[in-house]
Structure formats: C-alpha cells, structure tokens
Image (cartoon, rainbow, N blue to C red):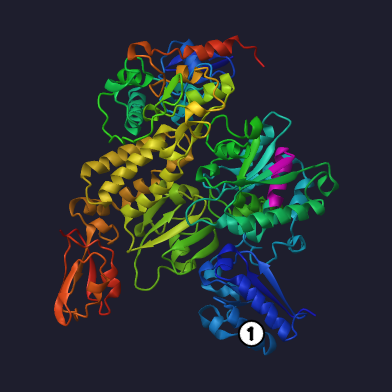
Amino acid sequence: MRRLEVLLCAGTACLSSGSRAVRQALIEALSAHGLTQEVRVVETGCMGPCELGPVLLVYPEGTFYVRVKPEDAEEIVVEHFLKGRPVRRLLWAGEAPPLKELDFFARQKKVVLANCGMIDPEEIDEYIAVGGYEGLIRALERSPEEVIEEVKRAGLRGRGGAGFPTGVKWELVRKAPGAEKFVVCNADEGDPGAFMDRAILEGDPHAVLEGMAIAAYAVGARQGYIYVRAEYPLAIQRLERAISQARSYGLLGGEVLETGFSFDIELRMGAGAFVCGEETALIASIEGRRGEPRPRPPYPAQAGLWGKPTLINNVETLANVRHILLQGADWFSSLGTGTSKGTKVFALAGQVRNTGLVEVPMGITLRELIMEVGGGVPEGRRFKAVQIGGPSGGCLPEELLDVPVDYESLRQHGAIMGSGGVIVLDDSACMVNVAKFFLEFTADESCGKCTPCRVGTQMMLGLLSRITSGQGTEQDLDRLEELAELVGSASLCGLGQTAPNPVLSTLRYFRDEYLAHIHERACPAGVCTALIHYRIDPEACRACDLCRRACPSGAIEGVPGKPPYLIHHRLCIRCGACQAACPFGAVHKLPGRKE
Amino acid sequence: MIHLEIDGREVTARPGQTILEVAEEAGVRIPTLCYLSGLSPRGSCRICLVEVANWNGKLVPACATPVQEGMRVVATSPRLTELRRRVLELLFAERNHICAICVSNGHCELQDLACELGLEAVRVPYRFPGLTLDASHGKFVYDPNRCVLCGRCVRACSEVEGAMTWGFSGRGIHTTVEPDLGGPWGSSETCTECGKCVQACPVGALVERGKATAEQEKEPQLLAQITERRPRA
C-alpha cells in the first residue's frame, strides 16, 4: 500500500545542487526502515524556487522541504515518514502551510507549468493520467480550420519574444500553397538568465509534443523538428524518451490515434549559437548550413525548411496549446489583459529573494512580480532596476514598477516581454556596465553577416568602454545614440535590430549615471574599477597590517601598531583585497577616480 | 503582373522579381555592394536598403526582397542616403581600407560607393586589424585586410564554379572568408584556379598576382554572362 509520494525536483538547478544524492540517500533510508512499499520517490521537473534547491514535496499533505542534503534523509524518513512529525528545520521559512499558501506560489497561476514538479516527466502514463493528449483528441475531433479558429479566438501570442498571434501564424501556414509542410519547435533558448523552456522540456516534455501534434494537424504537416540546444542534455534525454513513448502509444507516427492523421517528430541539436534562435538562422542550421539569418520576406510560413511552408513556434507557446483545446478559447482569453492573453513564465534572477521559475497571469505589475512573487531584493539593499527581455530587452527603473506585464506596455517603455528572463538589479549595479554586459553578449553572438550588427555593435562597445574607463565625453553619448539608431534600423535580423535596446533604455532612465562617469569620472555604484578609489578610515583603522599584506600591488603603506594606514592611489589596482581583509570595516570603496 | 510604386512612379513587374531588378528596369538607381548579377542575393551589406512606405516604413534590402502587389517603395531619399553612408562608414572602419596604397585604387566598388554617397570622412575609429595576407597561391593574392565580407567570392565559387573552396569562418567581428576552412590558399585541394572569385570581388581583397594597379580592372559581369548561358533547371 502506498502511503506517501515524495516528489523530488530533478530539474537542472536541483540536480546541480545535489538532488541525485538526496534521492539515493532517501531510497537507502526507506529501505533500511522497510518503507519501500509505502513511500515512493518520484523525480519530477522544476518546481520553481531554484535558489532553495534541492527541494522536495511530500504528498498527500504537501509538505515542502528545501535545501535538503543527503544526510537529512535519515531524519526525514524517521521523524516524518515513521513518526508523522515534519522536520521543521527543513521547511520553507520553518513553517508548514499548504504549498499553495506560500507567497511564492499564491500569486502564481500555473497553466504551462502545472505538471512541472507534479508528474514524472519520464512516464507517459503519468502525463496521460492528468489529462495528457486529451487536447490532441479534442483537436482531431474537429476540422483543422476549427482548431485554428479556437487558437485565434484564445488570443495566444508567441512566447519566444515577438508576440506574433499564434493562430494567425497557423492560418498563414495552413493557407500557404504546397503539399509538404513542417512544424518546428524552437527550443534554442539562449537569453542570459533565462531557463523557462528548459524547465518545460525537462518537466513536461509531452506537453510540447502534444502542442506540436495539434499544430501539425491544424497546418497540415506530417513531420516536426525540435531544435534544442545541445547544452540542455537532460531536456534532450527526456524529449527522446517522451518521443519514443508517444510513438509506442500510437500518439506519434503513422495513423495517430487510428485517424488518418500522421505526424512524427525528430530532434535537431543546436551547436550553441545564440543567433540560431532567430527563425531563418534556425532553418539554415537544421538544413546543415551555417547558422545565419536571411532577409524576410519570404517568411518561413511561405518558404521555410527546404523551401516548404514551415510553422515555427516556441516551446512555451506550444505548451499552451493543449490547454486551449481542453478548456476552450473563452477560458484562456479570460486570463490576462486586452491584448495579452493567458499566463507567462518568467525566470527570476539577480538580486531578488526568490530566484527561480514562476508563472503569472499576463497583466500583473512588475511590482507584484518582483516584490511579491519574487520577495523583493535581499535585506539591506535597494531596488534599482529590472532588466526584462534579455539582450533584446531593456532596464526599467523603480518609477515604472507599476507597469503591467504585457507585450504593448513593456515595449512602450523601452523593454520587451522577450522570452521571459527577468534580472533584478539593486543599488550595487552600475547601469552603464549592465548595458555594456548585454552589448558584449550580442556583439559576441552576432553572426557577422550584416554590416550594422557586425561592426556597429563593436563601435558601440568601444564607446561604452571609453565611458566605463573614464575617457568618455558627452559627445560620445550622441555618437552612441546615432549608432544605436543605425544598428536598430539597418540590421538584418532581430538580434541586431534589438541589440541597442539595453543601451537605449539605460540612456533613457539612467542618463545621470552615464553623465557621472563622464563629468565626475565617478562610477556611483562603485563597479567600474577605473572610476572608484579605496580609502582607509583613520578613525577605524587599528593598524593590524592585514590590508597591507593582502594588497597584491604594494599600494598600502603603514607600520603595524601605528595607525593610520594609507593607500597610494597611483599604485592601487582597485581589486578590493584590502577591503575583504580588513576585520574592522575600515576600508571603504568610494566613487570617483583618485590619482 | 504585379503593380507597385518606386519613388512615386508606378511600375509593373513579373512575379519573383526583386525590388532591385524592377528598379533597374525603371531606371531608378539603387547602390549595391554584396549583390552581383548572376549570383543569389545575400542581402547582407545593407547598402541597398530601401523603405517600404506601406509596411510601416520597414527597411528591406532591395536585392533580396521579392516585389509584392501594391508595395510603395522609397528608393531615394535623404534619410536613405544618410543611412547608406553610415553603413559604408562602418565598412571602411572595419578593416584597413587605405585607397592610396591599394592595388584596386581607381576601380574599387567600395571607393565608388564612397564617391557616390558623398562619404567625405570616417567618423568612427578605424579598427586596424592585423590580418595575415595570403600570397601562397600561384595566380592570385588574398588580403583579408581589404575584405568587406560581401561573400561574392563564396557564392561565385559554390554557385557558379561548384568548387566550394571559399567559405565563411568565425562569427561576429571575427568573421573571415577562408579557403578550405582555413588557408593557405596555395595548398587548397578544391581550388580550380578559375579566378571567378577574383573577378567577383568588389575590392582589393582578391587580386591577380603580378598585375599593377592600372591593370587590375575586374570583370564582375562575367558571372552573369556565364549563368545566363546555362540551361535553366
């Protein structure tokens, strides 16, 4: 008789923090206490609060353990499973409320992620038990046109970033002339700090397969490809398993569910170029050519893979589809705002208490997302900005925290929805440096095909480096804006067209900080090493000599026991070793260059 | 027939024609660089960008964009000239384009474009990369310092000659054109020494060995002459 189910997160984050070892320890402890028949351990996909991993959830009552170590297994088994007393020190915040009432989960609305962390992603039976592949059955009962109409009415838009209406795209492919058509799932997730698609692929791979099958039926395709990055080995492994299980159940392959509809899926691995997330570059890569975009039109809907009409949808978009077929367009469009329907998965990262994966209804404000779901910035720090939309997105300041999260509002303020990366920055972040970081990323990932992106991003980077190294002039800001305009308007693909966004949005909201770098030769956040200095407070210094011994460049002068100690700014390389070494907090990092 | 407008003039076109082809027939000049008649369009240099007024002013490469019914194309405007000039400026600054010491001085498409677009000074800093000259080939010389990455050699070699000797390597600012995935050209096993790449090259990156500046005039029209004579598939 099964008494308890232990759901152990086996997403990439929890695996990195050691959930495999926890599983092993649990299984050993269960067997030592003769509970193997009573307690089952299930490895699931991502549960969300990655920072607290490894996490595990005990059902039926829903006890949520965080930061579990292998050596905790014995205690959990004895205290909880045998004696019925949850191990308080391992509970989230030491409390045991139902999972749904924890702040982190209460504000969320899980649609796409509903199965992640709840089912074993390697067992198709578990997926079917919670309604899996029923969406496909509903779709096959209707005509392809009716399916497209339902998706259009639902108002689903592309979750890869651009927000193109999914149903309209399907219709374009359906109506495109040609007997052979393809469905491609874009799983080339590459934004720094974004891992929504990975979590879906690892935690609920069948949802993506089902979405693809429904899409294929709607547009008239017989073959599908999932283009997934090779850096996601676990996602690839689970997808391969899911595809072979679906084939053996007659859910993929010839005569799906004994209807006249045939559809099969193959995986294609990306070799690690960010630009291959752009649809025409992705097509080139699948075809075996260099991953370079080409001008559109013609769009892939007209001439895509091997010149045939091709539907390309993102992982999260496809994972939404089955819910529309199951619960109806009206239900789906009741979630969200006027133009942005449904939910969106975000990867919360940076200076926020609850980093991890969250799913919220569209239209929630940034403040709710960051302060309530994310728990705000850690103690003692102040919120400064949120970078949303990855390298194509922008940085929004505190004044704009009440902006609703929908495609139009974010774009209007200089950011984008993007694929869902949200990086929270606190007062220790230099906005010029943040802009430079993202531009370095896009410049490095530029494929080099078109002139504005290849050369223009380098020129912009040169100007930003001048500013962060204290050689900038106000004229450089004009140059930067001119180049941003050029790169944004003249580049061939979305990578170049959106590359200037982090620069433009920081110039718009944090111009003061740029000006401080230029006029005062000071980095207010204390990040740009050329524009800061260290000072030893003579009052606090105890002349212990630790700083002098830690200094790698011999920049500190002083005699043990005889304060004060002094820093020679000319010799100082501003590495901060003295500050780290000082036991009295006497070394301060201050903005401004000192010669 | 497709009806569209280029610079306010109503023109007709056959399906499948590009904006550039239709503009040429109508006598509207659009400057180009990576485009070469006889090769597939690449749309990468961005010199031939035109504006489609009824696509929200979207900028598209004239060489690679098929015409569509009702399109209103702006091919000539002060904004476009400025934009093309800026792109050209980036090309000059990217490598070492110093006309006075270049073997293609006087018959160089990059130089011609600078004159046509009125580029008088380059305001962005020159990058001056120190790329290695490849003079290992018996008949030709490749100087990557003068390359504009238009890919005309790559396409001439694969689409017309079928040798596929030239290809792109690296990415972003580190992109280069290389024979057999990395030189030297002289020891290439695929090169047929046909010289089509040299004739296709718009600048002094690929030149004939031993020819003086005055003798270095190229015949890029050869590529179209060859392909036009071939039977169509």
Residue B220 screen position, x and y as percent:
46, 14
Quadrant in which the N terminus of chain A appears: bottom right
Left or right relative to A403: residue A198: right
Nearer to us in this view, A18 or A544: A544
Q: Residue at x 44, y 20 (%)?
A: B140
Left or right relative to B48: residue A512: left
Left or right relative to A31: residue A471: left
Residue A86 in sight here: yes
Quarter occupied by residue A63: bottom right
Q: Eyeballing the image, is A138 above or below B108?
A: below
Residue A212 screen position, x and y as percent:
69, 47
Q: Eyeballing the image, is B2 above or below A558?
A: above
Residue A413 in sight here: no
Residue reaching furthest right?
A258
Q: Amino acid at mark 1?
A: Glu
Quadrant in which the C terminus of chain A appears: bottom left
Q: Eyeballing the image, is A2 above or below B183?
A: below
Residue A247 screen position, x and y as percent:
79, 51
Crowd tier of the residue under label 1, counting other residues whose Cα lies within 10 Å: few below 14, some 14–19, many 20 or above:
some
Residue B22 forms part of the magenta stretch: no
Residue A219 forms part of the magenta stretch: yes
Q: Residue at x 21, y 45 (%)?
A: A473
Q: Which residues are magenta?
A: A209-224
Q: Chain of mark 1?
A: A
Q: Main secondary structure of the magenta part?
A: helix
Left or right relative to B149: residue A258: right
Q: Eyeballing the image, is A578 above or below A492?
A: below
Residue B127 screen position, x and y as percent:
31, 36
Residue reaching furthest bottom?
A83
The residue where tag 1 is placed is: A74
Q: Residue at x 67, y 56 (%)?
A: A237
